[in-house]
Image: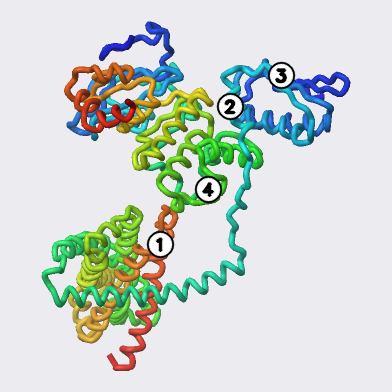
Amino acid sequence: MPHTSLISVHTQDDRLTVAGRGAWTSEHAAELEQVVNETVATYGKPAAVDFDLAGVERMDTFGALLFDRLRRSWSDQGVATQVQGVAPRYKILIDELAGADHGERPPPRRREAIVEHFGHSVVDSGKDALALLNFIGATIAAMWRVLLRPRKFRFTAMVNQIDRVGFRAVPIIVLITFLIGCILAQQGIFNFRRFGADIYVVDMVGVLVLRELGVLIVSIMIAGRSGSAYTAELGSMRMREEMDALRVMGFDPIEVLVVPRVLALIISLPMLTFIGSMSALLGAGLVSWGYGGITPDVFLQRLKGAIDLDQFNVGMIKAPFMAATIGVVACLEGMRVGGSAESLGEHTTASVVKAIFLVIVMDGLFAMFFAAINM
Amino acid sequence: METQSQTPLPGAANGKDAIIRVRDIVVGFGEKIILNHLDLDVYRGEILGFVGTSGGGKSVLTRTILGLVPKREGLVEVFGENLDDLSERERSALERRWGVLFQQGALFSSLTVKQNIQFPLRENLKLSQRLLDDIAFTKIEMVGLKPDVAEKLPSELSGGMVKRAALARSLALDPEILFLDEPTSGLDPIGAGEFDELIRTLQQTLGLTVFMVTHDLDSLHTVCDRIAALAEGKVIAQGTIETMMQAQHPWLRAYFHGARARAVQRGRG
């Protein structure tokens, strides 16, 4: 027979008297639920039940709900129940809950099964590709409109973006490419020395940095630094209906928001690539001097012989294409953000991952192209 | 009889128990002083309507009481405890005893309505899933929503439904004090009326004390037991709606006797 600090039960013939006491509040809800369940299980189906709640000192929704469950578990079986001793201030609450019809509850949200999830991903990646194509088209069309009516071009917005994605990125780009140059040179010298070919480190660093690494490192940095910022900005503007506001005022969000941002990247990224490449060469030169004993004038002499303008051009030609890719992917992901914070995070991640992936794919395609034209 | 007062009235003097006592509060941002030596009492079991100019510091006061905005001077007592003197544990225990309805609802956007309501329960109490669900559906029903809202995400709800769902979440732990920041803003007059009714019912059912920042003259007339008005960083008047109507302060006259106020009164006949 449950005799706890919350409920005590007395039987008399077939009649049950359930007396409540103590605080029937949220702090004791777990205990009370257990007692309620036990009480129902222990006493099965009595002839009648009297509830005496005079001893209940405090009651909140939790207590009232559990009392309601206790009473219903008997009254639903046709057992006559009577309630007495309810303090007036709790009576409203108990009546409220008793009157509640526990209507149809919706089934919980279904999680996708693995196969289903896989199927959705495949379909989604197809849709992604189409959306990207569509967005590239829309951006080019918007640029064309701007070209036809240059007065519509948002010059100030673009300059502001160049300041943010180009100018302010200089310190971190310089630092990172400098370190990469140092590491390349150190590794080159360390390994080439075994063949007595230290001096070739200059050729290696020169070709590698100017053709590939300069533009790749800078693109990846910018995809992480500015691509994510674009997505987050446009995404939160979408969440707050700012995009819709632009649209109903007769502005095209692509013209106002996307074009200046993409153009700013296209202008900034080649400049950053140049700065980054020079900084990497500087790092390589310093390490060659200090670690490999190659003096600066020997380094420069050798560099002049090792590289020609083509090597430099290959790197620089790629930069604006990388910039356009990063800009378009970042803006597209921003425009696709839904209503929740989670969606914003999801699309920002997707923006950076996709941009970096596409940058590397494009780099591969360029490598094939330049090999084909002997550049 | 309440009079216009800026001096603190000790709770015992008028036979009421002050559940929130704000004394001599100064809050500012940089050079700008928003609340200037402000005093306010909220009594147990009442619905206090708090009015004031836009940008005048109504939300700042609410946020100061809740501890979201630091104060420069003064004292905030809730349930008779000075909030500055509490240890972290005591404070979080105290925070469980109040519920807050933010102006935009502030539902967690990645959780369903049901998960939103269950969030504070899960964190604070060890309850069975069945009881958690029962509580969530009871609260959903209490605030007048249909059960099928439970599995929806906040982005799938209309503005009024968001307010109700957020109210359900703020009631999750059966708080003793409920803070409402412009609960009826953004609702149509019928929805706003229903919301007022709801707050009145809940207040009676659950024995709540309600601190309501509002601009809704209808709410002030129908549900508020007492009104406090904020201007120039201070509470310039407090009392029943009748007291407010008779107040001489120019801002109060404009507020309670303006065109919209007259329309509301005509409507009441």
Disc 3 is placed on an element classified as strand
Q: Which residue is mark 1?
A: A347
Chain bearing tag 3 is A
Dot label at residue A52? 3
Q: Residue at x 66, y 41 (%)?
A: B130
Residue A279 shows in this picture? no
Mark 4 vs mark 3: same chain? no
Closer to the chain start, of discs 3 and 2, is 3
Q: Are marks 1 and 4 in contact (CB under 8 Å)?
A: no
Residue A165 image position (x, y, % from top left): 24, 63
Amino acid carrying label 1: it is His
State how far apart marks 2 and 4 are (Cα).
Answer: 23 Å
Secondary structure, mark 1, is helix
The residue furthest left is: A151
- Residue at position x 34%, y 70% in the image: A329
Mark closer to the chain start, 1 or 2: 2
Q: Chain of mark 4?
A: B
Disc 3 and disc 2 on one polypeptide chain: yes
Q: Residues within 10 Å of mark 4 (few under 14, many from 20)?
A: many
Give the residue pinned by disc 2.
Answer: A93
* Circles 2 and 4 in contact, beta carbons < 8 Å: no
Q: CA distance from mark 4 to mark 3?
A: 36 Å
Label 1, label 2: how far apart the Cα atoms are: 46 Å
Alpha-carbon neighbours of circle 1 within 10 Å: few (<14), some, or many (≥20)? many
Secondary structure of the residue carrying numbered label 4:
helix
Say the numbered circle drawn on residue B149. Answer: 4
User: Please, which chain is the residue tagged with disc 2 on?
Assistant: A
Amino acid type at circle 3 is Asp
Chain of the residue under the numbered disc 1 shown in the image = A
Marks 1, 2 in one chain = yes
Q: Nearer the viewer, residue A262 or A62?
A: A62
**Whole-number angstrom distance, CA of label 3 to CA of label 2:** 16 Å
